[in-house]
Amino acid sequence: MTNKEQLMAIYRKENTGNIPWGAYGIFLLPTGSNERYLRNNGCCWIHWTPVCSWLAPGMSHMAGWMLESEIKDVQMSLKFIWGGKGRVIRRTYDTPVGSVYEELCEEPGYHSLWVKKFLIEKPEDYKIVKFMVENTVFRVNYDAYIEADGNMGNDGVELAVVDRSPFQKMLLELTGTERLFFDLLEIPELVENLLTAMEKRQEEAFQIIANSPAEVIWMVDNVTGVITYPQVFEKYCVPFYNKVTDLLHANGKVLAVHFDGMMKPIKNLVARTDIDCVESFTLSAMGGDLTIEEAIEAWSDKSIIANIPASLCLKQEKEIRTYLHELLEKVASHRNFMLELSENFPPEQLRRVLPIVADVMKNQ
């Protein structure tokens, strides 16, 4: 089987062979001799391209990600502020119903953007962001995906990356944890109105996504059950996942959701979703609160894609091999499992640990 065929067997929940492994190509695994060695020895490449622009306001403005969301009747301006801790990006949105701004900074690991100041800070900000959501213009990006998928070939899978679900987008990008949960208690109607508007527009985006040439849809939701706790996960996340998954399944596509946090509080609720893959699952060796045996029992109808624990960087080669052999024994009854490099390793440990992983996985 090619690397692509191995990965697709996992995403489709059809694996009957060995357990594959892969890496977020380019993003976490720099090109070079080490990367070439790993790919030549079974490491499957995982990359992503959006097939539709994202709901405004987009979290990032990195070229090529289609996150520069177009918004009718809204002007967005950028200001770069330099200080002792590096550059801060201030993005201001001027709308007919008012102005809001956010401040973002680049984190050193993934070089992704972290929110320093959220857009929504007071009740009147909700109507401004709602205007932006309702006036988002979605753009099709099929050609870019087709080109990326063609370049990938059989080395791995090109995912169609999509925006976060409405609740997770609000939590992580628009309000922050404290603001959102206080507002759910004190001004729930404003929160609910914005969430409803976001869900309605995202359903439009998923019509575009469902008709795209991509087969595997990847939602980077970054859920942890200790923050998105069971009551809100059940109310806001489960129905949305099931609605968009039904649409995707009707068009022959599968949905993988990035659940990289503490999953025990919402374990049974995740089981009630129709999603196909629990992706970037955090194993116990990296502090996850579910054992792999518990995860397999709870999600027997889903593929489980676990991130390679960065804690292996603290172990010697013999310990790494022992851990991986024991893990493979634990998942022997659940073939729809794979390992992937989806969390950061120190650069020198990429060169030391991953060749060991490659050898164990190649000779399982």
Image: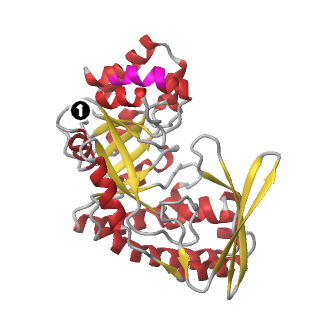
Residue that carries the numbered disc 1 in the rendered image:
333
Residue 357 rendering spot, x and y as whole percentages: 37, 24
Query: Viewed as shown, does residue 162 lie left or right of 194?
Result: left
Q: Is residue 353 magenta?
A: yes
Q: Residue at x 58, y 77 (%)?
A: 194
User: Which quarter of the figure is the C terminus placed in?
Assistant: top left
Kindly identify the residue that appears in the image at 27 percent across and 53 percent down: 150
The amino acid type of the residue labelled 1 equals: Ser
Q: Is residue 173 above or below residue 326?
A: below
Mark 1, residues whose alpha carbon is within 10 Å: few (<14), some, or many (≥20)? few
Q: Residue at x 56, y 44 (%)?
A: 110
Q: Residue furthest right?
A: 84
Q: Overall secondary structure of the magenta stretch?
A: helix
Q: Quadrant of residue 7?
A: top left
| Most foreground residue, 137 or 268 | 137
Residue 84 in sight from this viewpoint: yes
117 lies left or right of 224 = right
* Residues drawn in magenta: 351-358
Image coords of residue 81 (percent x, y) = 78, 58
| Residue 266 lies within the magenta run | no
Most foreground residue, 47 or 257: 47
